[in-house]
């Protein structure tokens, strides 16, 4: 039975990519907390992962050299955040406290995902090596 590492790690790879994209957006929000007119943006992790799964299920393989390659991409778009605080007068919608909390939560979830993936790989390595028993 062949071991498919792509199948083992694909979900975690996609999750890490979405988390990285979200961290970049949140960092951008924090960096522009004092920029007049800046609108806070965020990614919905759940919908981004659903989009990634749909993308995965629609993957096609080429069986002939003259076939066109088809790529189905999901709609992982950043959305503007609905502000919790009243308008500050300059049009900026960044709530620094909310952005920090979202950034920390995202970082912790990313770290948990990496720890889970590391455990999976260690288990796979142990299974391949026979558990270290001679």
Image (spheres, helix red, strand yellow):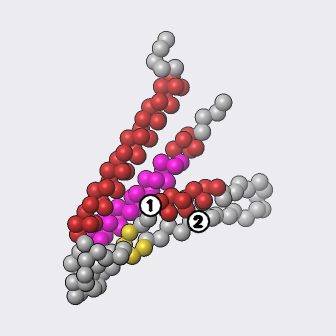
Q: Residue at x 54, y 69 (%)?
A: 75
Residue 24 appears at what percent x and percent y? 35, 64
Whether residues under marks 1 and 2 lie with C-beta atoms below 8 angstroms apart, the answer is no
Instruction: Say the numbered circle drawn on residue 63.
Output: none
Tell me if I can see residue 36 in this picture: no
**Magenta stretch?**
10-31
Residue drawn 50% across and 63% down? 47
At 51% across and 44% down in the image, what residue appears?
A: 9
> Disc 1 on helix, strand or loop?
helix
Reply above or below: 25 against 14.
below
Left or right position of 73 against 126: right
Q: Which residue is mark 1?
A: 45
Q: Position of residue 127 (x, y in %)?
A: 52, 25
Q: Is residue 122 magenta?
A: no
Q: Quadrant of the N terminus?
A: top right
Q: Residue 12: give x, y in percent of width and height.
A: 48, 48
Residue mark closest to the camera, 1 vs 2 = 1
Q: Earlier in the sequence, mark 1 or mark 2?
A: 1
Crowding at mark 1 (Cα within 10 Å: few <14, some 14-19, many 20+): some
Give the residue number, with chain letter if any, for mark 2: 73
Kindly indicate the quadrant of the structure image that contains residue 78: bottom left
């Amino acid at each position: 039975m062949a071991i498919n590492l792509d199948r083992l790690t694909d979900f975690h790879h996609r999750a890490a990519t979405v988390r990285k994209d979200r961290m970049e957006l949140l960092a951008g929000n924090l960096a522009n907390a004092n920029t007049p007119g800046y609108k806070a943006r965020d990614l919905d992790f759940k919908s981004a992962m659903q989009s990634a799964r749909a993308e995965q299920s629609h993957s096609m393989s080429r069986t002939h050299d003259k076939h066109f390659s088809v790529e189905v991409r999901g709609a992982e778009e950043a959305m503007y955040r609905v502000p919790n605080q009243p308008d500050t007068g300059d049009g900026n919608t960044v709530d620094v406290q909310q952005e920090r909390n979202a950034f920390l939560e995202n970082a912790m979830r990313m770290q948990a995902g990496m720890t889970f993936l590391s455990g999976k790989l260690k288990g796979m390595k142990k299974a391949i090596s026979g558990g270290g028993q001679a």
